[in-house]
Amino acid sequence: MTANYKIGNEKLIKVLDGASGHLRGLLERQGRPDGGLRIAVVGGGCSGLQYKMDLVDGPRDRDILVPSNGVNVVIDPKSALFVSGSELDYSDDLQQGGFKVSNPNAVVTCSCGESFAA
């Protein structure tokens, strides 16, 4: 059964070079070369909202699929309201490494970089 989803563009989220290379490698190692990274905004964290990220095979119903820099990002419509205009990067930092979202909508961010308020 095919999911009924929309195609978004990089105005919603743009994947930077570091993140796209790392994501492509992760998906290939998992045998999901056509998969993507799901970014969801959920309640929690020290500032009220935080990002939840998972590797997925593809979009579900009502999702927005954003092809960017050779990889796919999947976002549900509610989370899209919060991440619009963001950039996804990757850091190899031992303490705070991993995928990072730079979000221009975040009014309050905390030092961990994983939680924000909009």
Image (cartoon, helix red, strand yellow):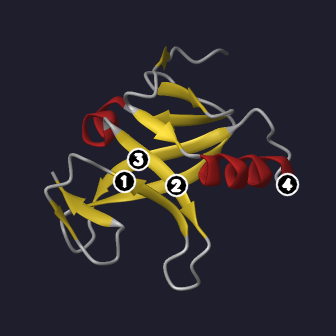
Q: Which mark is residue 40?
A: 3
Element marked by disc 2: strand
SS assignment at label 3: strand
For residue 89, the mark is 2
Q: Is residue 98 above or below residue 51?
A: below
**Disc 4 secondary structure class:** helix
Q: Name the amino acid type tagged 4.
A: Arg
Mark sitting on residue 102: 1
Q: Residues within 10 Å of mark 3 (few under 14, many from 20)?
A: some
* Apparent side of residue 29 relative to residue 72 in the rendered image (left or right): right
Look at the numbered discs 2 and 1 and tell me whether their residues touch, using CB distance below 8 Å.
yes
Look at label 2 and name its amino acid: Asp
Q: Residue at x 45, y 21 (%)?
A: 8
Residue that mark 4 sits on: 29
Q: Is residue 86 left or right of residue 82?
A: right
- Mark sitting earlier along the chain (1/3): 3
* Position of residue 19 measured from the top left corner of the image (x, y, whole percent): 61, 52
